[in-house]
Image (cartoon, helix red, strand yellow):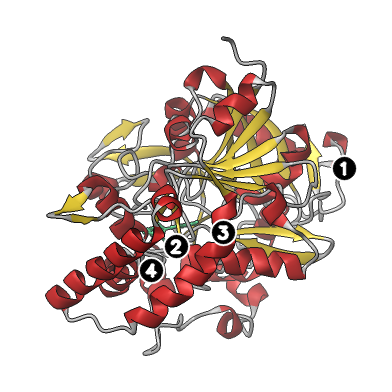
């Protein structure tokens, strides 16, 4: 039977935080279902709605349209208490997401021992400490003797007593091995209570989404994290633990691949990255990575938003040290983690990485976010817009992202400069409102990425967008 509906996939092409939620929110009215297929509460999706900034972690974007349903697919890992809290917070903002949210019975549960493991070993990667890696590892391990490690939403729904008992046993086994301490009884009691509120949202029918599309529904898959953080194709080991590619949407989103219509990529023209790992075009290189990752004794970031707000942005932009330019752009762009509040590392727009992502994900069109910020370059020493147009590895030019971490760290990005612009473009509505210098840069991006740019973000509000 041929499906009457279809699915599009929206993914980030870089290291996350490209502004996918805002793009998904802008497109949501064209679809019947917005679905997540990977990750969990590690995602931090911010949407500005009625002038209010709302952060979503597990609930898919689309909540602001009352005719749109939301689906959390089997590829996701769910923190039950955090999901319940998120739904309650949305309710306080006048949005009852529970009526329209459906959860796959095959999605896995984040258990207390996953959080304990991540809190203990996650800092070398710089994880969000949401237990994501340990949960996906347990999914692959399946069992440890008689203990079930991969506990799913449907398991808890069918037989809560057995599986909550199993969760306790899993924590105790890990605690005995590593000396973890926690009041596991009260943690589980809390989780049980929260689960009761979530349980009615679990779909018993594993063909739930498939049947919807067969009946004509249009689905938008909303990727979490981003292509460069894919567990296999990304910059291993500094990646997340799920599949973030367009192809992963169908496995983790519970839909057959023949429903696919097109893939849309989101790229931020001023790049950012949180956590450790290679970032060839980073302003200030290693110095910036160390600075951004520095934490106080209580784990909070040493150079967070409040500290940096006191910086003299004009002086930093005019500096000949790229590390300073990066700091200024972070302040102007408000690049601080939604989940972690860490300062994000900032870099030049990398067109080699973008073209690599376009090829492997079959991206048909791109949305470029934060284009208004390119204006900041007019206040730098040479006043021009930098772009990474090539990679040199050991004296040879390459057109791909190398697999080996060591090789990627040796890559020398070739940076070229294009004419900048001084105009504030926040109020631009049509392509004709854009400065010619920006139009030229957009054309070059299309040529180098090998794919059309369908629209650009010129501010954080839904309306601050130009369709090309
Ligand atoms: P984890 O997904 O919490 O295990 O973290 C692994 C890596 O992915 C770390 O570098 C995180 O900072 C990064 N990461 C995870 N989720 C996001 C996201 O939504 N945006 C950006 N980076 C993310």
Residue at 79%, 47% (x, y): give it.
65
Among numbered discs 3 and 2, the one appearing first in the sequence? 3
Q: Which mark is residue 198?
A: 3
> Residue 90's quadrant in the figure?
bottom right
Tell me if mark 1 has few (under 14), some (14-19) or many (20+) residues whose alpha carbon lies within 10 angstroms of its own. Answer: some
Residue indicated by mark 2: 274
Q: Is mark 3 within 8 Å of ligand 1?
A: no
> Residue 297's quadrant in the figure?
bottom left
From the image, state whether disc 4 or disc 3 is nearer to you: 3
Disc 3 versus disc 1: distance between alpha carbons? 41 Å
Residue indicated by mark 1: 429
Among numbered discs 2 and 1, the one appearing first in the sequence? 2
Disc 3 versus disc 2: distance between alpha carbons? 31 Å
Q: Is mark 4 within 8 Å of ligand 1?
A: yes
Residue 257 position (above or below residue 60): above
- The answer to whether mark 2 and mark 1 are in CB contact below 8 A is no
From the image, state whether disc 4 or disc 1 is nearer to you: 4
Does dot 3 land on a helix, a strand or a loop?
helix
Among numbered discs 4 and 2, the one appearing first in the sequence? 4
Quadrant holding ligand 1? Answer: bottom left
């Amino acid at each position: 039977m041929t499906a009457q509906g279809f699915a599009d996939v929206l993914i980030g092409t870089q290291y996350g935080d490209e502004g996918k939620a805002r793009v998904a929110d802008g497109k949501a009215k064209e679809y019947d279902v917005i679905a997540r297929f990977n990750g969990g509460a590690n995602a931090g999706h911010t949407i500005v709605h009625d002038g209010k900034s709302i952060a979503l972690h597990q609930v898919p974007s689309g909540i602001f349209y009352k005719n749109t349903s939301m689906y959390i697919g089997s590829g996701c890992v769910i923190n039950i208490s955090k999901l319940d809290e998120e739904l309650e917070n949305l309710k306080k903002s006048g949005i009852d997401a529970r009526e329209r949210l459906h959860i796959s019975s095959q999605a896995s549960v984040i258990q207390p021992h996953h959080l304990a493991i991540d809190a203990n070993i996650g800092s070398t990667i710089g994880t969000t400490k949401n237990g994501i890696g340990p949960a996906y590892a347990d999914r692959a391990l399946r069992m440890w003797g008689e203990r079930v490690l991969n506990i799913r939403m449907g398991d808890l729904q069918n037989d809560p007593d057995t599986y909550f008992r199993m969760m306790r046993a899993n924590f105790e086994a890990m605690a005995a091995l590593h000396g973890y301490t926690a009041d596991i009884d009260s943690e589980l009691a809390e989780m049980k209570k929260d689960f009761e509120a979530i349980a009615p949202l679990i779909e018993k029918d594993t063909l739930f989404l498939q049947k919807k599309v067969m009946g004509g529904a249009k689905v938008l898959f909303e990727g979490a994290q981003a292509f460069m953080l894919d567990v296999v194709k990304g910059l291993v080991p500094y990646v997340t633990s799920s599949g973030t590619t367009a192809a992963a949407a169908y496995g983790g989103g519970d839909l057959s691949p023949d429903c696919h219509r097109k893939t849309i990529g989101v790229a931020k023209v001023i790049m950012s990255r949180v956590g450790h790992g290679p970032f060839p075009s980073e302003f200030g290189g290693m110095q910036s990575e160390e600075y951004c990752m520095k934490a106080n004794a209580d784990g909070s970031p040493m150079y967070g938003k409040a500290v940096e707000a006191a910086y003299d942005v004009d002086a930093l932009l005019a500096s000949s040290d790229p590390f300073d330019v990066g700091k200024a752009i972070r302040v102007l762009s408000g690049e601080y983690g939604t989940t972690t509040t860490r300062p994000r590392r900032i870099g030049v727009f990398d067109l080699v990485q973008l073209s690599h992502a376009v090829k492997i994900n079959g991206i048909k069109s791109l949305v470029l976010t934060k284009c208004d910020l390119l204006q900041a370059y007019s206040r730098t020493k040479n006043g021009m817009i930098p772009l990474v147009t090539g990679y040199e590895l050991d004296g040879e030019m390459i057109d791909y992202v190398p697999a080996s971490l060591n090789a990627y760290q040796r890559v020398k990005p070739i940076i070229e400069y294009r004419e900048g612009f001084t105009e504030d473009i926040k109020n631009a509505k049509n392509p004709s409102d854009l400065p010619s210098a920006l139009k030229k840069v957009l054309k070059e991006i299309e040529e180098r990425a090998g794919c059309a740019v369908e629209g650009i973000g010129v501010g954080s509000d839904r309306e601050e967008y130009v369709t090309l």
